[in-house]
Amino acid sequence: MTAVNLTSATQSSRKPADAPTQVDEAQLRQDLAAAFRLAEYHDWHESIANHFSAAASEDGRTILLNPRWKHFSSIRASDLLKLHVDDPTVMERDDAPDPSAWSIHGGVHSTVPHARVLLHCHPTYATTLCTLEDPVIQPIDQVTARYYNRITYDNHFGGIATEASEGLRIAGVFGNHSVMMMGNHGVSVAAETVAEAFDNLYHLERAARTMVLAYSTGKPLKLMSPEMAESVALEWESYSDSAMAHFEEMKRVLDRTDTSWRD
């Protein structure tokens, strides 16, 4: 497994030097650790697999990533690996990350500038949709409508993503989207902050659950009109502050029983 290498075309898509993103690494570590614990809390995790990452440098090329084969329920802020996406020796380290984690997250962070945070997992209902011939989340209530025309669908499963080429292929599908439904696989959610990524993943799984339950009735779906669905989706975009509040409230939920994620 080799580190992801960039092409000149990819390098041209980096965040402009005149628009730096200040990083408080200590806070970022705590937020990402909280996201792992909350994924376990909501049962989005899968054994000791799946992976979350966040850019820990202004240029987005140094990232934090969970260590290999550590359960989400035990991850602490200090456990997170600090890696550089252009380092060819990452997979030679004694504490090398999981190959699929490095492939996907190295690929996305090196080529998708808006993905400063990337949450990749296999939550039950969203993954169920990803196994269908038609995995599209239809606008049948206000949560599903949040994703109207706002998801990219990757229908070309390339196996367990252990090679850099597969990570770059996945990154290429992202485009300017923040949510990817990965056929026969799972989901990936990108955002500027951990809070926004967590909130998006939370509502994505809720939307998928509604779709699966609606399908299970065997009755026809009652779809919103395109105009109404787009209107609802735009309303969601005006509620960005709620993502921050949601995440802060959920961190308080964690603290009621265990504060070790902050360590």
Image (cartoon, rainbow, N blue to C red):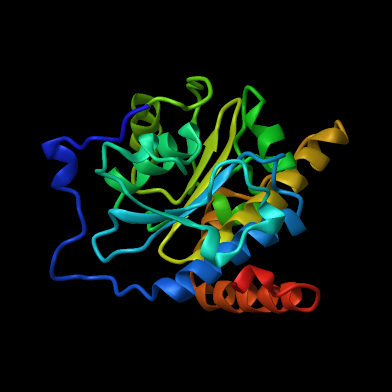
Q: Residue at x 39, y 32 (%)?
A: 167
Q: Is residue 75 above or below residue 205?
A: below
- Of the pair 191 and 3, the residue shown nearer to us: 3
* Residue 218 placement: quadrant: top right
Left or right: 88 as drawn, with respect to 217? left
Task: Work out whether residue 45 can be spotted.
Answer: yes
Q: Please tell me how many numbered marks the rendered image carries.
A: 0
Counting from the top left corner in percent of width and height, residue 128 is at 71, 33
- Of the pair 17 and 148, the residue shown nearer to us: 17
Quarter placement of the C terminus: bottom right
Q: Residue at x 85, y 34 (%)?
A: 216
Task: Work out whether residue 199 can be spotted.
Answer: no
* Residue 126 placement: quadrant: top right
- Of the pair 178 and 232, the residue shown nearer to us: 178
Q: Residue at x 26, y 36 (%)?
A: 88
- Of the pair 120 and 234, the residue shown nearer to us: 120
Quarter placement of the N terminus: top left
Left or right: 8 as drawn, with respect to 136? left
Left or right: 135 as drawn, with respect to 231? right
Q: Residue at x 28, y 44 (%)?
A: 111
Q: Of all residues shown, which one is farthest toward the right? A: 217
Counting from the top left corner in percent of width and height, residue 141 is at 71, 55
Counting from the top left corner in percent of width and height, residue 211 is at 73, 42
Left or right: 97 as drawn, with respect to 50? left
Counting from the top left corner in percent of width and height, residue 210 is at 76, 47
* Residue 136 placement: quadrant: top right
